[in-house]
């Protein structure tokens, strides 16, 4: 990969770009849901999770409260065969996926991060996540050194909503053309930022791509 000229800040998406969950999402859902009597298998949960994410996409605005409520709808759309009036499943999953121990850093991230820092770029993270991402990053060097973490729940808008990118620009004090976003989602990390005047690199991990800079 080659950094376009005039770039001053390189930002990364988080999930699927920097980090991935371990164990897999469907395995964790099944483990916790079985405690409440769910009969769904891991493959069933995986399919139901993909469908629920599509149905309950982030809207035009968001916040910490709205994000947790969105995940409540997702969780009980996926696991609809239990009686959980006290949101025990949601609480368990929320805590699990808010822990640094539940995530792994892709092998190419540390060397890429150090190389970009050596070249003098301002490094940051721009993610459709909530404030839990800060504690997750804190547990994974070199992300623990990152001072520029932008999450949709705090910005108030999710990618690819244009106001997300505008909010990040204002906080960085940079012009759109000075910012590069690297991520795995075409809409949120490529077409969205490009429409906002940013530069973008689509990292296709599903095709075996990894980070390496010339």
Image (cartoon, helix red, strand yellow):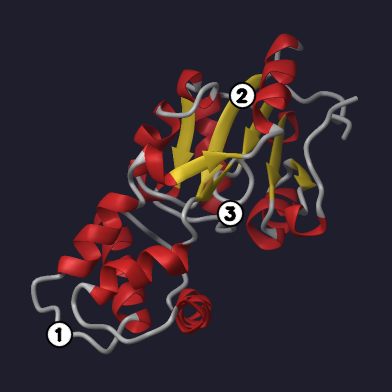
Which element carries disc 3, helix, strand or loop? helix
The residues bearing labels 1 and 2 have C-alpha atoms spaced at a distance of: 44 Å
Mark 1 closeness class: few <14, some 14–19, many ≥20 residues within 10 Å: some
Which of discs 1 and 2 lies nearer the camera? The answer is 1
Q: Residue at x 21, y 85 (%)?
A: 82
Mark 3 closeness class: few <14, some 14–19, many ≥20 residues within 10 Å: some
Which of discs 1 and 3 lies nearer the camera? The answer is 1
Q: Is residue 58 visible?
A: no
Q: Which quarter of the picture shows residue 105?
A: top right
Q: Which circle marks residue 83 in the picture? A: 1
The residues bearing labels 1 and 3 have C-alpha atoms spaced at a distance of: 39 Å
Query: 153 or 86: which is nearer to us?
Result: 86
Left or right: residue 195 versus residue 62 is right
Vertically, is 56 above or below 93?
below
Q: Is residue 118 visible?
A: yes
Q: Which residue is mark 2?
A: 123
Q: Earlier in the sequence, mark 1 or mark 3?
A: 1
The quadrant of the picture occupied by the C terminus is top right
Q: Which residue is mark 3?
A: 162
The residues bearing labels 2 and 3 have C-alpha atoms spaced at a distance of: 21 Å
Q: Are dots 2 and 3 in contact, CB under 8 Å?
A: no
The quadrant of the picture occupied by the N terminus is top right
Instruction: Give the farthest residue toward the left.
Output: 86
Which element carries disc 2, helix, strand or loop? strand
Left or right: residue 49 versus residue 178 is left
Q: Earlier in the sequence, mark 1 or mark 2?
A: 1
Which element carries disc 1, helix, strand or loop? loop
Q: Are dots 1 and 3 in contact, CB under 8 Å?
A: no
């Amino acid at each position: 990969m080659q950094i376009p000229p005039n770039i001053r800040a390189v930002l990364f998406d988080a999930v699927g770009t920097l980090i991935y969950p371990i164990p897999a999402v469907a395995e964790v859902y099944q483990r916790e849901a079985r405690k409440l009597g769910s009969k769904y298998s891991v493959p069933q949960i995986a399919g139901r999770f993909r469908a629920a994410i599509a149905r309950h996409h982030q809207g035009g605005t968001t916040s910490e409260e709205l994000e947790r409520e969105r995940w409540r709808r997702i969780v009980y759309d996926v696991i609809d065969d239990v009686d959980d009036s006290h949101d025990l499943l949601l609480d368990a999953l929320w805590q699990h996926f808010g822990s640094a121990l539940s995530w792994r850093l892709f092998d190419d991230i540390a060397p890429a991060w150090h190389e970009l820092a050596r070249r003098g770029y301002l490094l940051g993270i721009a993610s459709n996540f909530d404030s839990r991402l800060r504690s997750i990053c804190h547990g994974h060097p070199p992300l623990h050194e990152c001072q520029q973490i932008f999450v949709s729940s705090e910005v108030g808008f999710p990618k690819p909503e244009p106001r997300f990118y505008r909010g990040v620009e204002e906080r960085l004090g940079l012009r759109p053309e000075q910012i590069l976003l690297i991520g795995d989602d075409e809409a949120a990390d490529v077409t969205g930022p490009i429409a906002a005047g940013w530069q973008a690199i689509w990292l296709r991990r599903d095709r075996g791509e990894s980070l390496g800079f010339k």
